[in-house]
Amino acid sequence: MDLNEAIEARREDLIALTQDLIRMPTLNPPGRGYREICEYLRDRLAGSGFDVTLVRAEGALGDSDRYPRWNVIARREGARAGECVHFNSHTDVVEVGHGWTVDPFGGELRDGRIYGRGACDMKGGLATSIIAAEAFIATYPDFAGAIEISGTADEESGGFGGVAYLAERGWFDPARVQHVIIPEPLHKDRVCLGHRGVWWAEVETRGRIAHGSMPFLGDCAIRHMGAVVAEMEASLFPALALKRTAMPVIPEGAKQSTLNINSIHGGAPVPEEGYTGLPAPCVADRASMIIDRRFLMEEDIAQVKAEMRDVLDRVAARRDGFDYTLSDMFEVQPSMTDRAAPVVTAVSDAIRDILGNEPDYVVSPGTYDQKHIDRIGRLKNCIAYGPGVLDLAHQPDEWIGVQDMLDSAKVMGQALKTLLGCADAK
Ligand SMILES: [Zn+2]
């Protein structure tokens, strides 16, 4: 049996594995069921000859005794020395949301698709990499090097209790891992080289409280914030729309710089649940806005921050009493792996070989765990490659196609042949 046949023969196993993973509701936040899914993966991979370690990200952002951040790393040594290929998947899924017509944790199989929260993002990708690795090991027991598979926490909330924690402790040190594939749902014929940068910040405007019937005695922080938004509309948004990147970002709209206003809060706090009275008449003395700026390889983060500060300073120059603070919350540098990197060429050749078409090279509009592998782990040879349709991620009735997973597993298997020195590798 050749490798492709060995993968096809595992179709039922792949379906059952994907369903099992979906049926564990590893919702993040708050971070439920990490231990359970890590133990499941430990038992599965130990049965396939992997040495398995469970690591709790003790003390990491989000870790608590109630919601511990568990991660699993499994390693299978080959018959001789060589390089290590690591498949990293996050085990967490985002909230269910509204609009589902199937059980979000049922793992229902219908017309060749498996449904559920996390089906494409990314339990289907995790299952695909496990099947690819197991079929590869069975077909080429004398392979060189090593294969690792990890299931990590908290990708959806920044990855600090997952890949970042592991990278800080050397798990992605280039001395022990040489190639990383993250099976996020980018589609079976796409190689994702990296992602744009991120800067989150909070803008606060301040005013002075007074009686609402005499607002001239106070100073309204919400009106000041309104002036900030108006200035952003007039000068910042048009400027961002003109910036274009040479990075192959998808979708097309994300080839420019973008800024989202995530939230604005001002004035009196939202009344407690059950309060049935009227609000009190007060002039708002504080308003805050959270912004989410996504930037390009060609931009410098200091410049990105200076642009926003310029907006605020322009407003300050013309508004009496305008006072603000601008605070950093979170930042990530853009990341893009070279097209000539060995993991890129191995997966690209495998796509040509298995699927018969040219791979599409893309960059993700949002970040994923590659940022930690690149910045903390200092490992540049990293891509996202996996089955599934990106647009379905975080949506109701999320699904993954069984045939897409099988095709993707064959591509992963072929890439393993190339990277782990198998004799008949093309
Ligand atoms: Zn994901």
Image: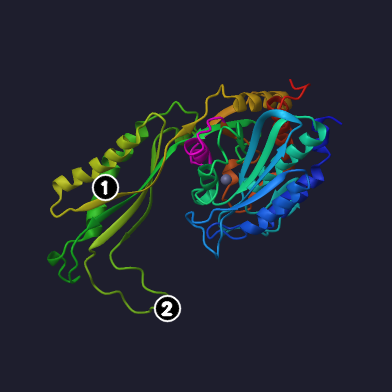
Mark in the foreground, 2 or 1: 2
Q: Residue at x 30, y 43 (%)?
A: 233
Question: Which residue is at the front of the view, 249 or 93?
Answer: 93
Distance Cα–Cα, label 2 vs label 1: 35 Å
Q: Is mark 2 within 8 Å of ligand 1?
A: no
Question: Which residue is at the front of the view, 319 or 363?
Answer: 363
Task: Check disc 2 and give the amino acid type.
Answer: Gly
Q: How many marks?
A: 2
Question: Which residue is at the front of the view, 311 or 340?
Answer: 340
Q: Residue at x 77, y 50 (%)?
A: 16
> Pointer 1: residues within 10 angstroms few (<14), some, or many (20+)?
some
- Residue of label 2: 274
Residue 141 visible in rendering? yes
Q: Residue at x 26, y 54 (%)?
A: 225
383 falls in the magenta region: no
Task: Check disc 1 and give the amino acid type.
Answer: Ala
Tell me: 185 left or right of 225: right
Q: Is mark 1 within 8 Å of ligand 1?
A: no
131 lies above or below 212: above
Whichever of callouts 2 and 1 sits on the residue coming sooner in the sequence is 1
375 falls in the magenta region: yes
Boundaries of the magenta span: 363-381
Which quadrant holds the C terminus? top right
Q: Position of residue 317 (x, y in %)?
A: 14, 45
Q: Please tell me the numbered disc located at residue 230.
A: 1
Can you name the residue that lies furthest to the right here? 1
